[in-house]
Amino acid sequence: MNAKTAGPAVAMTAVSMVLTLAVVVMWLGTAMPWPVALVVGLGIDGGWLATLAYERRLAAQGDHSHAVTAVGWCFGLLATGVLVAHALTAEESTGAWLAVAWLPVAAKALWLVHGMWERTALTPAALGAIRGIQQEARDEAAVARARLRADAATEETRLTAVTAAGARVARVQAKTAATLAGAWSTLETARQGEDTGRALTSVTSTVTPGVTPDVTPRWELPVWGPVEPLSALALESAPALTDAQLDALVDTIRHSQTPALSYREMAVRFRAAGHSASEVRLRAAWKRVA
């Protein structure tokens, strides 16, 4: 893993040093003796290489020096400036020389990337632990999504069944109301009819005390609906359980059977016993005692 970042940086450094030395010798060799130009080129490359070696030594010790880094970048920029100046003064192939003038800066940037990789590198054991944690989180998220989808599907099925049952009840009630309304209408028509009234009088006079043939009995239709209003039931809310009381109840119900009950079985028995608590508080109490 170290060679993946150090290898390109070393190769780019070597190429840029050779290129800088060649350019300095060719460019300054026409204006001064070539040994002097060679010394100048070696001085630029040597200063850059010395600062780079010192930076690597500090990095190996877990330290860092801004002054050394600044000096190294100065040598890199100086080498780049020499290459750019040579490219601009060259009589031919100016574009080609400018195309390679960025190599010293690129080499410094690669060493910067390599240093950042070293500071953030982890051991295989740490990477394995991170992968395990991430996989566990993905598994928990997938299980939670599946549980939510299953709960949503169950709730949708329940609501569909309740809606269908309610619709059937409404249809039966509407049909019954129509039948009763027809019966009431028939009875009212019979009561209002003149011939039917006399016939009813002759019949009721023999079975109803105090009814004479001259007095037409009054037939009252049944009243549709309750005749007396129902009193509302006053529901008194039970006092809320404290966390300690809730924990004690959950622990008692959980260990009421061997092996200990699961959360769903405990919740069913908890509510069947008449206790009241929100799902969030009940689950929190379960986690505390379990």
Image (tube, grey):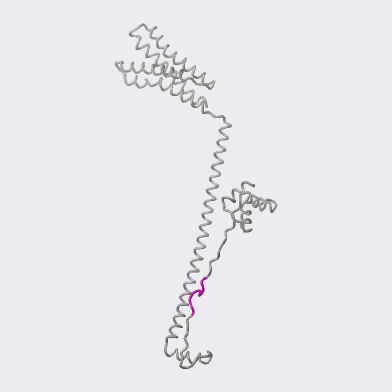
Kindly indicate the quadrant of the structure image that contains residue 238.
bottom right
In percent of the image, x 47 and y 82: which residue is there? 220
Q: Quadrant of residue 47?
A: top left
Residue 112: image x %, image y %? 46, 24
Q: Is residue 269 left or right of residue 95?
A: right
Residue 280 in the image: above or below residue 27: below
Front one among 11 and 211: 211
Q: Position of residue 101 (x, y in %)?
A: 37, 20
Question: With 132 as the anchor, is 55 left or right in this view?
Answer: left
- Relative vertical location of residue 149 with respect to residue 1 in this rendering, above or below: below
Residue 240 locus on image (x, y percent)? 59, 54
Residue at 45%, 77% (x, y): give it: 181
Span of residues in magenta: 222-229
- Furthest residue in direction left, as rendered: 91
40 lies left or right of 251: left
Nearer the observer, 164 or 227: 227
> How many numbered circles are shown?
0
Q: Identify the residue at the far right of this view.
A: 258
Most frequent secondary structure within the magenta stretch: loop
Residue drawn where x is 46% and y is 25% of the image: 113
- In x, y percent, where is residue 73? 42, 19
Q: Nearer the viewer, residue 130 or 222?
A: 222
Q: Tell me if residue 177 is in the magenta stretch.
A: no
